[in-house]
Amino acid sequence: MLEIKDLKATVDGKEILKGINLNIKPGEVHAIMGPNGSGKSTLANILAGRNGYEVTGGSINYNGHALVDMEPEIRAREGIFLAMQYPIEIPGVSNIYFLKNAVNEVRKHHGESELDAMDFMKILKEKMKLLEMKNELIYRAINEGFSGGEKKRNEILQMLLLQPKLAIMDETDSGLDIDALQTISKGVNSLRSAERSFLMITHYQRLLNYIQPDFVHVLARGTIVKSGGKELAAQLEQEGYAFLDNAEAI
Amino acid sequence: MIKLHLDAEKNLLQQFSEQQSKRAEQEPLWLTDIREQAQQNFQQLGLPHRKVENWKYTNVSKLVGKGFQVAAINAMDSIDITPYMISDLDCYRIVLINGQLIAEHSDLDLLKDNVTVNDLATAFATSGNSIEEYFDKVVDYTSQPFASLNSMFFNNGLLLEVAKNAILDKPIHIINISQNTDADLVSYLRNLWLIGKNSQVDIIESHHATDDSCHFVNALSEIVLQDNARCTHYKTHFINQASYHVAGIHIAQQRDSYYEQQSFALSGELVRNDIQVRLQDLGAECKLNGLYRAEDNQHIDYHIIVDHQKPHGTSIENFKGIMDGSGHGVFNGKVIVRPDAQKSDAQQMNKNLLLTKRAEVDTKPELEIYADDVKCSHGSTVGQLDEDALFYLQSRGFNAETAKNLLVYGFASDLINEVSIQPLQQLLKQEILSHLPLVSHFEELV
């Protein structure tokens, strides 16, 4: 599904990613952990196509496409979803308009008919119930006046509606209380399937108790320095990142 | 350019003396004095050019090149006003064509208990009414050559008096139609609105042109709010992109009165609104909102003065500009707090969005404070669309153009949502969205 080979990238001329290799197959859940400034969010943003990052080397292959040549909206319609670390507030545009049209953009791209208001509402209500979201949130402007937890739930709501093939979560767990974390995890777990892959970026091992990864990678100074199973996360939680000072890139 | 100005000024003064010799016989002496005083003002000021501070950013040479012949206001052939009505709006309607009240299209009978509507010429000819007390008393001609021209040349206009204690159940919609018979005409609109003590009224003032040719409107309005009166005034232009609209709106507020203006300038080649509010007595409050949008070859300009003269006055200004193509916007807002005006609260905000590198906006908020116990704030911003917000929408499947348009709409939406008359709000939404093609219908927008 996603093959990243020797990916190098700069931000404002400074090299942040120094040769990333990562292979994600359908149905797999990968977690990337690592200290601040290691390049985790950079990797997520490059995958989703945000401006301001220059890919200087290597390749990203997504289901047979060279990802770096695709516009962000095409990536979205082709099934890449980034749950943002800091969801953006957009005044004047209602959440429901945003959600419905996002869904229909994806459907149109795949030659499917657009959902009408009734059909959409039915699906929306069901997903919101799963995430224990207040009804009023869909009639407000996008993320405007939402609490931190409501913003993150809204991200996962979008993920549930858009049904991506590759879901990238950029520190979705940061700043959440345990109830919100459990609810969001429930939402994410409901999406897990043999065809759908996940890339979770997190600081904290706690998230991985609720969404169990198949693979854990440690990103430091722009490269993946260690990979393993979910036990690696527990080890990191106990021992911290101190071992990185001696570790060499793999 | 200077020769063009001098020729035009000479021509105007010549026209004035010809007209005045005929007019002076028909009009009351006090009006003749007003016209002659205006002529002297105009002679002193001349037509504005870019070396005059108050007109620094407003290039009026295309106006000056026009012939400035006063548009005729002969009885009009019957005109269909349906295109100028706001659909689903339940209102009292007043229709003026080139500044002339058209009684057959106006709801004068329905209004008569609460509101007296008259044309100015009739009011001038009748003695013993309040017109002499207020007419020309509110306007300040300082740096206002077009206001001077209006007083020199206006033929007729609207006198609207809201009775003491009248609470109107429906808004009044004043439809101003400009009908061109010749390319070089100017139509002079003149308004005097007297909003009586304890009364409450919503007034929609809309401007329209009958065709796509260049229409030039010079409008001058004086509005007096007596004690405890409340008036919300919506001003919209639905003029074509070739037209000029130069307007002075001068407001005098008496004790505890509330005046609100929501101004929308979304079309026209050259639009200039000079809004001057004088809070003349204790506890007067005004709120001014404005949304302006300019694209290629358009110039939209707001010059605002809010003058706090007495204690406990409040003023809130919130203006937003959207500049596209090579559009040019100007916001110049001055707040004066006089030595007497303690406990004044004045807030002013101007935000601008530049959508292209060629677009330009000149924003200049000014505070002149002579009292020490006041609360004043002002600010202005000029920015581009938020890259993070654009990316957010694109990352959810919206193409770049739609994402941009949603953000522009979002920028303007708070001002549109403040329009509490729903049919007008819908119309303004449609107007702004006509420039912002979106993925689907706007009804679902907030």
Image (spheres, coloured by chain):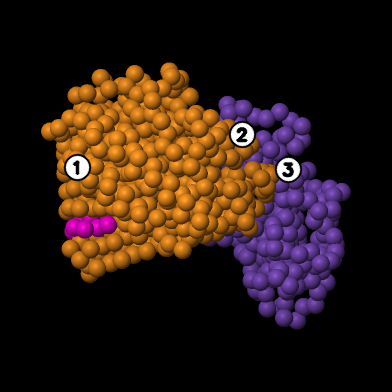
Chain colours: A purple, B orange
Left/right placement of residue B5 relative to residue A228 reads left
Residue A161, given in percent of the width and then of the height, sits at: 64, 39
Q: Distance between the residues labelled 2 and 3?
A: 17 Å
* Mark nearer the viewer, 1 or 3: 1
Report which residue position mark 2 lands on: B440
Q: Mark 3 lies on which chain?
A: A
In the image, residue B309 above or below residue A107 = below
Q: Residues within 10 Å of mark 2 (few under 14, many from 20)?
A: few
Q: How far apart are marks 2 and 1 (CA)?
A: 58 Å
Q: How crowded is mark 1: few (under 14 residues within 10 Å), some or many (20 or more)?
A: few
Along the line of sight, which residue is nearer the eye, A35 or B260? Answer: B260
Query: Which structural element holds mark 2?
Result: loop
Amino acid carrying label 3: it is Arg
Residue A157, given in percent of the width and then of the height, sits at: 59, 44
* Mark nearer the viewer, 2 or 3: 2
- The reply to whether discs 2 and 1 touch (Cβ–Cβ < 8 Å) is no
Amino acid carrying label 2: it is Ser
Q: Which residue lies furthest to the bottom in this view?
A: A246
Report which residue position mark 1 lands on: B30
Same-chain check, marks 2 and 3: no
Along the line of sight, which residue is nearer the eye, A203 or B288? Answer: B288
Amino acid carrying label 1: it is Trp
